[in-house]
Amino acid sequence: MQSIIVIVHIVVAVAIIGLVLLQQGKGADAGASFGSGASQTVFGASGTGNFLTRATTIAATIFFITSLSLAIFARENAGRSSTAGLPVVNEELLQQTAPASSDVPQPEPASQQPAAGGDVPAVPPAN
């Protein structure tokens, strides 16, 4: 069911893009006053606005409904954890530790660290 809604959602999204690109802007009516506006339309002088507006409204409503239903599916599946498609991890490899003779230097214990002095200035005593 979810995959059908995703397919409908994508098809409607592409349809909305196409319908919006087909519509004329508000400034496009200036050409119609010189006699060229009505001759270039498929649905007649007033039919394109009504048809494209209605089709865009219907497509936007369907897009909204599919978006809402996909959000509901996502909320229901959020609590479930799935391991499908994940690699199988060997538990024994996770429990092994790094060898003691690694190349990473280990910090010195606190008793062997040099005392204050050297390159770092001492903190003045509090009065």
Image: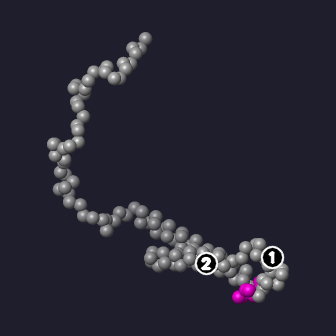
Q: Going by the image, does 44 lie left or right of 125?
A: right
- What element does badge 1 sit on? helix
In the image, residue 110 sits, relative to residue 59, either above or below, namely above
Res. 35 image quadrant: bottom right
Lateral position of residue 88 relative to residue 75, left or right: left
For residue 119, side relative to residue 96 (left or right) = right
Residue type at the position of mark 2: Gly
Front label number (1 vs 2): 1
Principal secondary structure, stretch drawn in magenta? loop
Q: Residue 30 got which mark?
A: 1
Q: In the shown orientation, is residue 117 left or right of residue 104?
A: right
Question: Residue at horizontal 58%, vertical 78%?
Answer: 15
Disc tally is: 2
- For numbered disc 2, what is the local secondary structure? helix
Name the N-terminal-most of marks 1 and 2: 2
The quadrant of the image that shows the N terminus is: bottom left
Residue 92 within the magenta-colored segment of the rendering: no
